[in-house]
Amino acid sequence: MPNSSRPQQAADSTPSKGGRVAAWSVHLLTGSGVICALLTLQAVIEHRLQAAFLWMCAAVFIDAIDGPLARRCRTDINAAELDGALLDNIVDFLNYTFIPLALIAYEGWVPDPGWLWVSVPALTSLFAFTHREAKDTDDGFFRGFPSYWNIVAFYVAVEMRLWGQEWTAAMLWVLALLSLMPVRFAYPNRIQHHRWFFLWGGVLWSGWLVWLLTQWPNISRIDAWVSFIYPALYLVLSIALDAKIRAGRLRQ
C-alpha cells in the first residue's frame, strides 16, 4: 500500500507565496539594522551622541523582534536561500560591537591611541560571534560576555568617563576577556527559567534608558545609577541559573 503521507509532507514543506513574502519581509527587517548602523556612525562622526544612542536603541528593538518573527514565519523553509543567522550576526556585529567601540575611541574615552584599546574587545567579540557554541538555544544562554558593547558605550558616556580613561580601558579589557571565557549569560528570548524577568525586566529597563536619552546631556547621576539595577540582577541571576543547571547535570 503506497504511503499517502509523503505527498502531504512534500506539500507542507513547499513554501507558499504568502509564506515567502512573510519570510523575506523578516529578512528585510533584519537587514534594516544596517541602516541604523549607518545612521549611528554618521551621528558618531558628527559628535551627536544622543542621536547615536537612539539609533542604537532602534537597532536593538529590531534585533529583539526579528528572531521570534523569523521562527514564526519559518524563514529557514520559506526563504531558505538566505542564511538568516549569518545575516543577523553581521548586522549585530556592526550595531553591538564595531560602532559602539568606535564611538568610545572616537570620543577619547580611552587613552591614546584609542584604536589600540578598542581593538582588543573588537577582536575577542569577533571570535565570540563566530564561536560554534556562542548560543545555547536549548538552555537559553550566551557563551561568554554577549558583546553588549552598545550598552557599555552608553554607561561609559553617562558615568564611566567621569572616572578616567584608564578605568574605562581596564573595564573594556576585562569584558573582552569574559567574551572568550566559558561563562554563560542568559539569552532573554530563549531562556526558560525566569523568562518573565529577563524579557519584561529588559523591556522596562530599555524604556528607562530611552527616557534617560531624552534628558541628554543633563542626565541625573541618580537616574543613571537606577538603570544599573536590571543589569546587576541580570548578571546575578544568569550566574545562579547557570550554576543550578550545571549542578543538575552533574547529579544525573
Image (cartoon, rainbow, N blue to C red):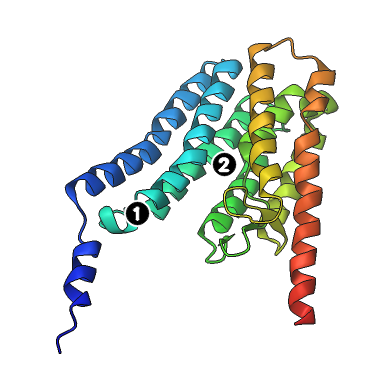
- Image side of residue 61 versus residue 165, left or right: left
Residue 202 picture location, percent across and down: 66, 37
| SS assignment at label 1 | loop
- Taking the spot 82% from the left edge, 23% from the top edge, the residue there is 162
**Observer able to see residue 113:** no
Image position of 133 with respect to 120: above or below: below
Residue at which label 2 appears? 97
Picture residue at 57% right of the left edge, 60% below the top: 134
Residue drawn 36% across and 39% down? 31
Measuring from the top left, give residue 117's x and y in whole percent. Answer: 68, 41
Callout 1: 10 Å neighbours few (<14), some, many (20+)? some
> Which of 22 and 232 lies nearest the eye of the viewer?
22
- Helix, strand, or loop for circle 2? helix
Instruction: Please tell me which residue lies in front, 251 or 49.
Output: 251
For the residue marked with disc 1, what is the amino acid? Answer: Arg
Left or right of residue 32, residue 181 in this image: right
Task: Check disc 2 and give the amino acid type.
Answer: Thr
If you read the primary sequence from the N terminus, does the residue marked by circle 1 or circle 2 appear first?
Answer: 1
Of badges 1 and 2, the one in the foreground is 1
Q: Position of residue 220 (x, y in %)?
A: 80, 14
Which residue is disc 1 drawn over? 74
Q: State which quarter of the image contains the C terminus.
A: bottom right
Total labels: the figure holds 2
Residue 230 place in picture, x, y as percent:
76, 37
The furthest residue to the front: 1
Residue 6 at least partly seen: yes
Write the residue at 15% across / 90% down. 1
